[in-house]
Image (tube, grey):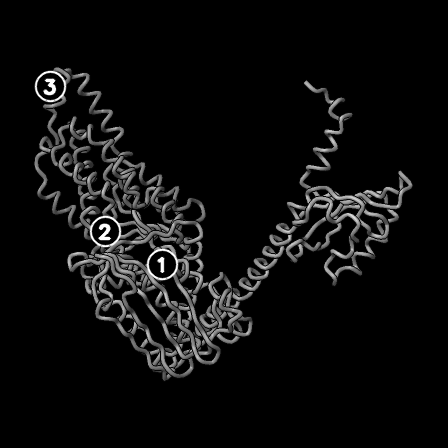
Amino acid sequence: MTSLKNYVKKGQFYKAVVEDGSDIIFIIDYDGQILYHNSSVKDTLGYKPKSLVGSNFFSFLLPSTVSTFKKTYSKIKRKLYQEGVEFQFLCRDGSYKYLELNSINLKQKEKIEGFILDCRDITQRKKDAEELQRAQKAKEHFLANISHEIRTPINGIAGMATLLGQKPSEAEQTMYLGAIKSAADNLKVIINDILDLASIDSGKLKFEQIGFNLNDLLQSLIGTFGHQAKEKKIFLSCDLDKSANQIFIGDPVRLNQILINLISNALKFTHSGYIQIKCTVDKNEKKKYQLRFDVIDTGIGIPKDKLKTIFESFSQADASITRKYGGTGLGLTIVKQLVELQGGTITVTSEVDKGSVFSFIVPYQKGGIKSIHKSSYSSENFNTKKLIGLSILLVEDNDINRLYASSILKTWGCNIETAENGFVAVEQVKNNTFDVVLMDIQMPVMDGFEATKTIRSFAKPKNKIPIIALTANATRSDVDKCIAGGMDDCIAKPFTPDDLFKILNRYISRKVKNQQQTEEKKPITSAFDLSYLKTISNNNESFIKEMIVTFIETLPNSIKEIQLTLNQKNFDALARAMHKIKPSVTLMGLQKAKIMVNEIEVLAILKKPTDQLNQLVYDFCLSLEESLESLSKF
């Protein structure tokens, strides 16, 4: 084996570090003549080995920087060592690369007027720094912009509230309240944009696969924006091609969101003329359709040099646009990402003072009339009579939020109890019976998570109370955290009366169903059949008792796991959970649950998020809880 001394003596060290190293080594005299360079100039700059020897180092520098570099060069003649000098060097292909040199002055020790320059390629580092600076500027611009966008409606709300306190006339009251509602709606849009972008960036945005009627969706949009267009004297129209006038399977909410953003933009920047929404079939292969949507306007247009950045976060055409028209600069970013996450593409063509065309293509499966998604709590079913007498515990530490929610609930005839923190809520649940708990998350003394955990630890049946989180943290991860924390559902603040009704209606419907099933319930012993367990254990009573106790102890966690996987739409995990619980269901002779477990497992494997699957899982968990109660008494 070659010793280290021999390695150094034979010059292998020099070859490894100097000749074959990744850094470029130059030896130049005080006048800049290149006397030596290693072979790294080929990999980094594209020149052949020894091809630069005899040339002048300064002639390869970016011309506009030569005088500045020579001043630095004069200074380092007086130093033994200098590091971190940046410059741009001409490459073989005519481009310039950023290099950084560390120099050793040979005159200080060797009495030779020259330098050894150790140069490293920092082009990528410079690009990263420039990108970071650009992103930082965009962020600063966004923060200034978003601050203005949030302050404006808040200032409007505060101002109108002050005017309402000055005993205005009835007409003025109506005007002030309308202004407050409009400002609050604007504020909600801004917050939702930020939350949507956060969900997209974290990868936690989920897309539905449900049936929807494209014509209904487009006509609804025309109705939504019709009044605003009419006020601006802009002709708003929709052109749906016959081949696209069908039922498709996909996420209508996200399609609606994309079109709302694009139409809102068109209305904002169009002062005369028209806005047209066109939908055609771009491609059609059997039941797979590529639908093309065009939003065409005759607005102010976008300069060509801004078209590349128009979809970037926090970006608008220029600062003057932001000042004049407002906006967060997030709308088109969200649109682009929503389109691309569904496997689509989006483009824009525009001409200043003539208008713009935003075009996107999204793939959808063709559906049928049976695939139309019908919500059990649509606005058509907004029947508050169902909520009369509903007993609700409202847990909320903010006085205004508590007043707002309780006032709505009282107008619906609900019986309301309130708690200002989680500790008071726990005491209320201990001493009273409630149909639903509306639980705020961030509270003093005891927060919503701790309160829910405590309530869920109570003896049955009180831990069955539906607990609905009220939270201003409305990202997907926050919702998942609420569900994992033992809550049944989540409603985001700020919420409308319609939002609150929908979620309460969902749980009151379950309550009615539970009551009906309780009335029809068979005798306790019919919930299970231990004959199979007795047979395989040879009627060993201690073994049978041990198996029942184990089942009773593990079942609550199994039920929780099943409900959590369904809420998260994690169908693989749901299928595994059903497969895992199947032997226990068979062993305990739970015939009703045994039939359902197979059906749920199959639907979960097929990944079919249908109302049928939701109902089956709900019935299955209810059946297990009934069996648990029966087995406990047994």
* Residue lying at the far right of the rendered structure: 111
Q: What is the number of the mark on residue 344?
A: 1
Residue 418 lies, with reference to residue 293, above or below; the image says above
Q: Position of residue 327 (x, y in %)?
A: 47, 69
As measured in the structure, the alpha-carbon distance from the residue carrying label 2 to the one carrying label 1 is 37 Å
Q: Which residue is mark 2?
A: 507
For the residue marked with disc 1, what is the amino acid? Gly
Residue 233 lies, with reference to residue 618, above or below; the image says below
For the residue marked with disc 2, what is the amino acid? Tyr
**Left or right of 73, for residue 533:** left
Q: Position of residue 485 (x, y in %)?
A: 36, 42
- Choose the circle earlier in sequence order: 3 or 1: 1
Q: Nearer the viewer, mark 3 or mark 1?
A: 1
Q: Secondary structure at mark 2?
A: helix
In this view of the protein, can residue 168 be seen by the observer? yes
Which is nearer the eye, 265 or 377?
265
As measured in the structure, the alpha-carbon distance from the residue carrying label 3 to the one carrying label 2 is 41 Å
Residue 386 placement: quadrant: bottom left
- Choose the circle earlier in sequence order: 3 or 2: 2
Q: Which residue is mark 3?
A: 535
